[in-house]
Amino acid sequence: MRNSTPLPWRYLPVLLLWLLAGRASAQRFAVIGDYGYAGPAERDVAALVDSWDPEFILTLGDNNYDSGDSLTIDQNIGQYYHQYIGNYHGRYGPSASTNRFFPSLGNHDYYTDNGEPYRRYFTLPGNGRYYEFVRGTVHFFALNSDPQEPDGVDSSSVQARWLRERLAAAPEPWKVVYFHHAPYSSGPHGNTRYMQWPFRRWGASVVLSGHDHHYEQLEVDGLPYFINGLGGRSLYPVRNPPVAGSQRTFVGEYGAQLLTANADSLTLQFLTRRRALVDSYTLHRAPSATPKLYPVSPNPFEGGTTVEFYLPAAAQVQLRVLNGLGQEVALLRQGGVAAGWHRQPWARGGLRAGVYYVQLTAGGTTQVVRAVAL
């Protein structure tokens, strides 16, 4: 029987603010590759990225040309991106309050002390060489594709086994894998065969890389791959004909990618430093035939989290939070809801730390997912 206990009044102000905001806005983040060479090109690309006001930035390697030296790293990175870097101690300005800069290692970063200046400069998750993090509906996996990686770079290595296990465990709808050496490329470096891992079979949504200094969109084994090496160092030619699977190539101007993630889509755009749109590619999530409640994210959470669900058709919906005794402690949504993907903010308010259960009733079905408040 439904618990009809009214929502405690103390939750109403916070919940009302969240409900008035409607669906959570899309996530926007930037991707730059082969960028770390101080000068007009990198300056212009950094200005382009700033104009997007991204939540954070990914890099596809070669952060510090030409030799990865500690004497050049701040000039090549901090000068343009210090406001995104957590725990920044350079000379160009203030640090970000929380880290918003997530690089991957490139071969040029390794030329001095096997990448030690890079590891000292950044404060990153995991071992700093390869790591994962989650932002909203996207799970990111940064790899180290340099052959000097202690945990290996082939598909049976320790690093690859880590990726396979973490991809399988990730509940987020979008799983972005990124690193430096391109598995498939129409540029001068060509294919990096040792990085041709079975990413699609392991669960990746898209693979991003650099190394060759051009832009390219490919599809291999049904999985989209992107090369983005136009961040500021130099421009490379593209071979003709391109490699198998190549769908689009571009060279001739520097630029960066803007990625926008929603509950039902992930859009990847490449724009030049002159703000010209070169390419736009959208991944769409496969719809469910029945109502579907997805795991909350983040989980565990502190101040709040987001509940996501999908409706194949318009339906009357009840979305509520239950405690361990099955008692309703928050009503997040009730009433008619249109078909499609929906993201519902859940502000914790005065709820104590503990285990809770989010329950979705829609279309004659009831589903429950577990959530932990810290």
Image: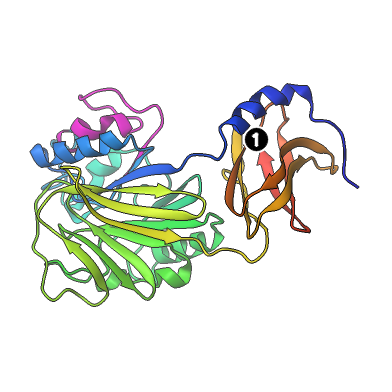
Q: Which is more toward the observer, 36 or 16?
A: 16
Q: Is residue 185 visible?
A: yes
Question: Horizontal placement of 369 versus 33: left or right?
Answer: right
- In the image, residue 154 sits, relative to residue 332, either above or below, namely below
| Magenta stretch, residue numbers | 75-102
Q: Residue furthest right?
A: 1
Binning the other alpha carbons within 10 Å of mark 1 as few (below 14), some (14 to 19) or many (20 upward) gives few
Quadrant of the image containing the C terminus: top right
As helix, strand or loop, the secondary structure at mark 1 comes to loop
On whether residue 93 falls in the magenta region, the answer is yes
**Residue 260: % across, % down:** 39, 47
**Residue at screen point 37% across, 76% down:** 221
Question: Horizontal placement of 79 versus 330: left or right?
Answer: left
**Residue 182: % across, % down:** 25, 64
Question: Horizontal placement of 353 versus 189: left or right?
Answer: right
Amino acid type, label 1: Leu
**Residue 282: % across, % down:** 38, 58
Determine which residue is flagged by label 1: 374
Q: How is the image coloured?
A: rainbow
**Residue at screen point 67% across, 63% down:** 290
Q: Which is more toward the observer, 271 or 107?
A: 271
Question: Horizontal placement of 313 versus 216: left or right?
Answer: right
On whether residue 356 falls in the magenta region, the answer is no
Total marks in image? 1
Q: Which is more toward the observer, 181 or 144?
A: 181
- In the image, residue 309 sits, relative to residue 328, either above or below, namely below
**Residue 351: % across, % down:** 72, 30
Q: Is residue 143 visible?
A: no
**Residue at screen point 81% across, 38% down:** 328
- In the image, residue 13 sits, relative to residue 196, either above or below, namely above
